[in-house]
Image (cartoon, coloured by chain):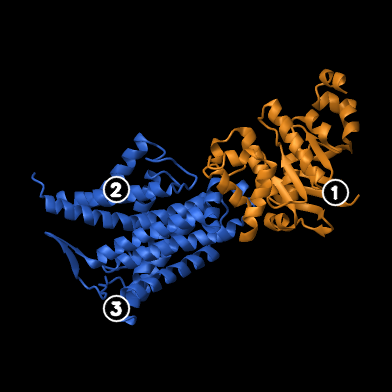
């Protein structure tokens, strides 16, 4: 098999863009796990809600990309707030099993309510950038991909600064590292958990808004994403945020390469083959586990 | 002498299990009280009940004239109750600097620097380990850090759970000296200690717990010489020569 360098580069760039979007989901999942010790299986649905919000906001905003994206992010943060105050606030840190069933149930409910309201027909989303793109030599990338990737990178930079340098973000790391010590210094776990869920929902909203002009929007688009994101969080070392980002970009690349060079069917299986292999070789994931390390 | 803390028939525990039962006592302002008892006697449970991190069943906790038994921990902290739980209660993947900043969590921004400068004055060691992750400090250093994190808020009642656990005898001495210094500034201290002898030597009063109930209470010097206490907690012979 001869590999065309331009084709490979194209796949690589696409893979990085895809990986950054996976990373947004995985990081939010990791954040919620760190603070609440639960896995939010309705996380993919937050992305779907963000994509739908983008889909409805764009025509209203005259196809302007940025205001529509801001609307989508605020809408999912609001959804995150409602999910937290309605359901998650009732979970105690040791109720992992209950959290799985509740968030999994919630995910299925959201999917079907969305299907009832907006039908399962896939929607195409058009923005001010349309299908325009940037051409570098023989490679062409649409602006929506470039912007999506750039927004994701900016979000990670912002998240890093918040977690590293603000009391707001530091409190999230504090709870992840030692719950008793967090109480000792007067942190209110529920307030911090709520903030973490809203922040994670915002990242999903960003991902959903960025993805909607790239792929079709349906109520099911988040369904399998959660399992991938969960796998990424485990591969990256549970609670390790940079680990999850690296694993996510790695996955984006692997998927893109496999999709480009092999039968497309292998693409979806690849992440789980890798996950199982990693779990056998390094049971705690590729990177140091826990503590919600940011650097 | 004014009363810092009044416990009236406190029953507390975890889940559906009361561990401490009908415990009553009074702590005077600025005194050091040692809480003695065997494993599982309920010493830590009592401290947690005073701070509010476990299940409270019945009774009254009166702090500076106010009933606090139904308040969450952060509200008690705001009123001046500081609690350093047992063993490595810090943020291990954060630097000393970040741990101290976390200790300032309930303070407004402008008060962080003076508060941190003040505890560094008390514990200059923290300055030398400024960028070290707390998890990489020695056991004694971690204990000092944890006390510093709570002292940032200038509590008027300090609850210490096994501050000398796992420390070398010299470090234990340092911790006791520090506790004495803190009490000398008017802070009321209630300390649970496995080093009963060392703790009694710096204490004004002693409380003895057995199976969740108060077994004995009195001036530290009296409790130290009580034959039952010497037999059970002080290992008889060694203590006779010291006493």
- Per the rendering, the colour in which chain A appears is blue
Work out whether B226 lies above or below B161: above
Work out whether B144 lies above or below A109: above
The residue carrying mark 1 is B29
- Per the rendering, the colour in which chain B appears is orange
Q: Residue furthest left?
A: A2
| Label 2, label 1: how far apart the Cα atoms are | 60 Å
SS of the residue under disc 1: loop
N-terminal label among 3 and 2: 3
The residue carrying mark 3 is A63
For residue B212, which quarter of the picture?
Answer: top right
Name the subunit of mark 2.
Answer: A
Viewer-side residue, B164 vs B7: B164
Q: Position of residue A198 (x, y in %)?
A: 48, 63
| Label 1, label 3: how far apart the Cα atoms are | 68 Å
Q: Residues within 10 Å of mark 3 (few under 14, many from 20)?
A: many
Q: Are marks 1 and 3 on the same chain?
A: no
Viewer-side residue, B105 vs A277: B105
Name the subunit of mark 3.
Answer: A
Q: Residue at x 84, y 51 (%)?
A: B4
Q: Position of residue A84 (x, y in %)?
A: 52, 63
The residue carrying mark 2 is A250
Q: How many marks?
A: 3
SS of the residue under disc 2: helix
Q: Which mark is residue B86?
A: none
Q: Is residue B40 visible?
A: no
């Amino acid at each position: 098999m001869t590999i065309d360098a331009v084709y490979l580069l194209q796949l690589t760039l696409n893979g990085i863009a895809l990986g950054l979007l996976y990373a947004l989901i995985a990081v939010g999942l990791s954040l919620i796990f760190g603070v609440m010790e639960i896995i939010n299986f309705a996380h993919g649905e937050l992305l779907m809600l963000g994509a739908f919000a983008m889909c409805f906001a764009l025509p209203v905003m005259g196809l302007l990309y940025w205001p529509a994206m801001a609307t989508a992010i605020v809408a999912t943060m609001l959804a995150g707030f409602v999910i937290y105050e309605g359901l998650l606030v009732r979970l105690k840190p040791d109720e992992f099993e209950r959290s799985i069933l509740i968030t999994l149930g919630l995910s299925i409910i959201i999917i079907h309510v969305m299907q009832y309201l907006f039908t399962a027909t896939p929607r195409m989303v058009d923005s001010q950038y349309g299908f325009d793109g940037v051409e570098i030599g023989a490679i062409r990338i649409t602006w929506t991909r470039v912007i999506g990737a750039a927004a994701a990178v900016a979000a990670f930079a912002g998240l890093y600064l918040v977690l590293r340098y603000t009391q707001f973000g530091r409190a999230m790391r504090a709870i992840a590292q030692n719950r008793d010590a967090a109480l000792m210094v007067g942190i209110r776990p529920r307030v911090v958990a709520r903030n973490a869920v809203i922040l994670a929902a915002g990242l999903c909203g960003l991902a959903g808004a960025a993805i909607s002009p790239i792929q079709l929007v349906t109520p099911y688009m988040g369904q399998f994403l959660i399992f991938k994101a969960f796998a990424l969080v485990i591969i990256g070392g549970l609670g390790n945020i940079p680990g999850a980002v690296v694993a996510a970009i790695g996955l984006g690349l692997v998927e893109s390469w496999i999709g480009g060079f092999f039968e497309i069917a292998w693409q979806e299986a690849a992440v789980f083959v890798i996950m199982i292999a990693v779990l056998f070789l390094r049971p705690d994931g590729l990177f140091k586990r826990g503590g919600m390390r940011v650097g | 002498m004014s009363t810092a803390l009044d416990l009236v028939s406190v029953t507390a525990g975890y889940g559906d299990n009361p561990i401490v039962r009908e415990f009553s006592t009074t702590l005077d302002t600025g005194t050091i009280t040692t809480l003695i008892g065997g494993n599982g006697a309920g010493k830590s449970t009592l401290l947690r009940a005073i701070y509010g991190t476990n299940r409270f069943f019945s009774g009254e906790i009166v702090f500076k004239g106010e009933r606090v038994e139904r308040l969450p921990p952060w509200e008690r902290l705001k009123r001046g109750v500081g609690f350093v739980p047992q063993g490595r209660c810090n943020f291990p993947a954060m630097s000393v600097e970040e741990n101290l900043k976390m200790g300032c969590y309930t303070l407004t921004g402008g008060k962080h620097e003076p508060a941190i400068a003040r505890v560094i004055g008390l514990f200059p060691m923290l300055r030398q380990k400024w960028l070290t992750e707390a998890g990489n400090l020695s056991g004694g250093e971690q204990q000092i850090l944890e006390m510093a994190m709570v002292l940032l808020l200038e509590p008027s009642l300090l609850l210490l759970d096994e501050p000398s656990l796992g420390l070398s005898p010299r470090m234990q001495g340092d911790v006791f000296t520090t506790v004495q210094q803190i009490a000398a500034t008017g802070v009321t201290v209630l300390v649970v200690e496995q080093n009963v002898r060392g703790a009694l030597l710096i204490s004004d009063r002693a409380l003895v717990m057995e199976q969740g109930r108060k077994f004995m209470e009195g001036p530290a010097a009296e409790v130290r010489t009580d034959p039952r206490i010497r037999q059970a907690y002080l290992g008889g012979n060694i203590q006779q020569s010291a006493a």
